[in-house]
Each structure stands twice: as structure tokens, then as C-alpha cells.
Amino acid sequence: MTEIKYRSDKGFENIPSLKDKCLRINLNSDIYGTFAEIGAGQETVRQFFRAGGASGTIAKTMSAYDKDFSDAIYGIENDKRYVTEARLRKMLDHEMALMEQRITRDKHPDKIFFAYANTVATIDFAKKYKGHGWVGIKYQVKPDQDYNDIVLHIRFKENDARLQQETLGKLGTNLIYGAFYKYNEPKKLLRYLYDHLDKDQIEIDTINFSGPVFEEVDNRLMSLQLVKNEMTDAVMFAPDGNNVLPARVLYKKNILTLRGSFRPVTKVNMDMFQKSYEMFIKENKVDIEKTQVIFEITLSNLRAEGEIDEQDFMDRARLLCSLGQTVLISNFKEYYKLVEYFSQYSKSRMGLAMGVNNLIDIFDEKYYRHLSGGILEAFGKLFYKDLRVYLYPMQNEDGSITNSETLKVHPRMKELYKFFKYNGKVVDINDYDNSILSIFSRKVLAMIADGEPGWETMLPEGVAKLIKEKALFGYESEEILHK
């Protein structure tokens, strides 16, 4: 029986039922593998057993619930934790090695092996922590090919352990089916993970693809898809280009954030970062060893020119990564939502580095009309935390400087602004580079597009070279322009 489900990008579309998906796997005589599930029963493999014909697919299923047994099989993690990416990858590698040892290629030359695993923690009895976990598959699509990996992190949203188990089983089935039958369309594979599931059941906040069939996949672009498809509110990727779990990067850290378009990243952006960082690490309770800097791009910023231009996004991502930065892509238009998000992972001091126009926007009431408490509710969420704004000045057309002392907010917001300003929540970056204040990303972008010389000097060292080498932001070399 085929179920019908609505997809926003294609309207109504036939989607295979979970049973149909399992049967297609089970009836493929070449697919053979193991299931290792810890923390939420064996809900994924149960789907395959119930569909029928599983003996041709399942080599082994196991669930090492006892920690001592688990350690004996997979080893002990350095941090003594069990619900981690490292643990999941050990499970996948161990189970795949056993497959290779026990099922000989001489006897089964056409078999394509897989190992599916998950390690999760469901909701606790007090219902304080809803639970999370790591899910992955290591597999082949050809017998003589190296293995491919799909690894993702989930957060449960349901308030019942049994429901979370069932949700995990559906997700696992979708993952295995997509891995074998949608691997050549990774964006669709990603969306189909939610077949027979709703966004209010589970959140996917990290995913990484690797292996020969995913050689052309950029995990930063897949990271963008998670936010674009509303699978999560924010994703993060490291300077090496791989998606990373925000909780791992931000846990108990002092966090300094810069929001911008970074289209492209300029000397002003980097001066703002460097000067605010120097001020931030001198603050009380800020340990430099436990400080994380985040460059944030909002989805609304990516949509500023209309539909999201994925190539434009990748251009920005490459430049920020080349500068060694960790990047957050978020769906938080308002700053208070960003601070709330960070507060899930850290209670330590936070800093927001921003320009004058950004601060003026924060004091604009129109952004808070959806809140019952209006701007006061938003400011309560924003400033009651251990947070400080580091304000980078703006040079006006007449050459004068606007800073925290001279900026003008709406008359109704004047006293509110004074309250936060004189309580030390807003501080000026004074040691700025006066010679670069006239640099704006939009000006650089226009110069690149028009082939106007001189834009290179407005960018951090090495960035102009990368733009030229990779032809980013529509850059065309002199040779092309003269053809």
C-alpha cells in the first residue's frame, strides 16, 4: 500500500510506505548487512523483520545495552560517553570489519555490504532532557567499491520515549532506503529522511556525507539544506568544510559572534573581529582556552537578493573557511533568538560584535510585534544573559563618526537604549583602523562585477587571490573579459 504525502516543492507525490521501502531492500539479493542499535530498542531493524524476506538482507542484529558489554565490543571512549559521533563511527567500523571477515568475497562476489548503527538517549524520566542521538550507515553500492558513509545527529522533540523509539525506526528506514536508492540525488535523500515523519517529531542538526559516491557533495551545501528545509534552526561547519555538531563546539564556551553578509568578507569584518576579540578575552570570567568565535550568516541574509543562490553561499563559505573561521547558518532573524540558541549550550559570557546599523535595528519595535511582550520581552531574553555588545563605528558621508554615544534610535526607544548603554551592555570598539571605515562589502561586490580595479586592497590577505583563482562572486579574469 503506497501512502500519499505532501511535499512543498512538488505538490502531492506518491511516497513508498515504510513496508514498501523495507521490502525493496529485503528483496534485493545483493544487499546484505548488520544492524547495531543502542538506546532506543531495535526499532529500525524491526521494520525490516516485519516487512518479510529479511533473511536475505540481515546478517546480524544486536543491541549492546550494557555499558560493560558495549565497551568490550567497541572499546572505551576517551570522554567515557556513549552517545557521540566517535562512538557511532566505531560501531560502524567494527560491524563492517566483522562483515568482511565472516562473509567471504569468494563465496559472495556480488554482495554489497552495509552496517547501520545508532546510539541514542531518549527522554529522561523527569522529562527535562528530550534526548538526542547519532545515526549512520556505512555501505557500498558496488561490490568492488570503497565504502560510503552518511552520519547524522538528531534531537527528539516528542515527550514520550515510546514515540521517540518509533520515530527513530522510521528515520532509520528512510536513511537506509535513501542510501541505496537516492544516493545520486543527495538533496532529495535529505528531504526524504522525513517521509512519514513531521518536523515537530525530530530535528536533524548535523549531517555529513563521505565516500566515492559523494565525492562531488559539499557538506557545507548540505548543511544549508537542513536550515532551508526547516529541519533545524541552525547548522555549523568547521574550517575544514565539514558540518560539526553545535552542541559539541559551543558546550560551556564563552561565545563571541559576528553576524554579517560576508559577501565578500572585508578588512572591516576582520578588524571588527580582531578588536572585539581582544576586548572580549579581557573581560572577567572569560577564559581564552574556552572561547569560541562564530561567524554567523542568517537565512534572511542569504535570501536578500530573492531565492537563495547556492553558488553565492558557497563563495562566502569558502572565503570564511580559508580564514580559519567556524560558520553558523541560522534561521534567527532577531538577535535575541540567536542568544537563546547559544544559551542551550552555554551559560558563560557572550559577546555580539556588530556595526551601528545592526544595533539601530535591534531597537526597532517592528521586529518584535509578534511577541506578546513586544520589545521588552525580546530585550529580557537578549540582555538578561551575561552578554555584551561590542559596537564598531560607522563613518558618515561628511567624515564624522557614529558610535554608541552619537547614534540615534527612535525617540520612544531613547531611554531604553540609555539604560542598556550606561549599564555596560553596549561598549564601543575604539582601537579600530580608521583607514578602512569606507570599505563596504556591497562596494567591493560592485567593483568585482564591473571589472573595476582596486577592490583587492579592501580584503584580508589571501582573499582576493582565492576569489580570482576560484572565480567567486562572478569574477572574470582579464583574459575572459578581452575575449
Image: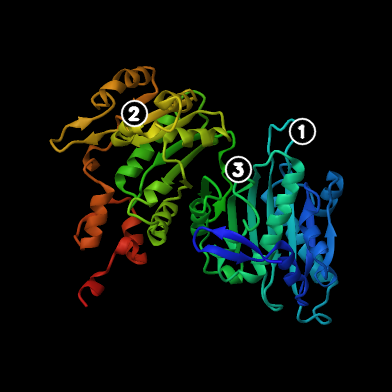
Q: Position of residue 228 (x, y in %)?
A: 48, 53
Quadrant placement of the C terminus: bottom left
Quadrant placement of the N terminus: bottom right
Observer able to see residue 87: no
- Residue named by callout 3: 248
Q: How far is disc 1 from disc 3 in space, using C-alphas? A: 24 Å
Is 23 placed above or below 61 here? below
Is 116 placed above or below 398 here? below
The image quadrant that residue 207 belongs to is bottom right
Give the mark, 1 or 2, whose residue is nearer the N terminus. Answer: 1
Give the mark, 1 or 3, whose residue is nearer the N terminus. Answer: 1
Q: Nearer the viewer, residue 63 or 67?
A: 63
Residue contact at pointers 1 and 3, CB within 8 angstroms: no
| Circle 3 residues within 10 Å: few <14, some 14–19, many ≥20 | few
Observer able to see residue 472: yes
Q: Nearer the viewer, residue 52 or 299?
A: 52
Q: Nearer the viewer, residue 331 or 258?
A: 331
* Front: mark 3 or 2: 2
Counting every numbered tag in the picture gives 3
Report helix, strand or loop for mark 1: loop
Q: How far is disc 3 from disc 2 in space, using C-alphas? A: 32 Å
Give the numbered dot on residue 125: 1
| Circle 2 residues within 10 Å: few <14, some 14–19, many ≥20 | some
Is 187 placed above or below 277 here? below
Q: Residue at x 45, y 41 (%)?
A: 332
Report helix, strand or loop for mark 2: loop
Residue type (three-letter) at the residue carrying disc 2: Phe
Residue 375 relative to residue 10: left or right: left
Residue contact at pointers 1 and 2, CB within 8 angstroms: no
- Residue named by callout 2: 363
Report helix, strand or loop for mark 3: helix
Q: Position of residue 165 (x, y in %)?
A: 75, 48
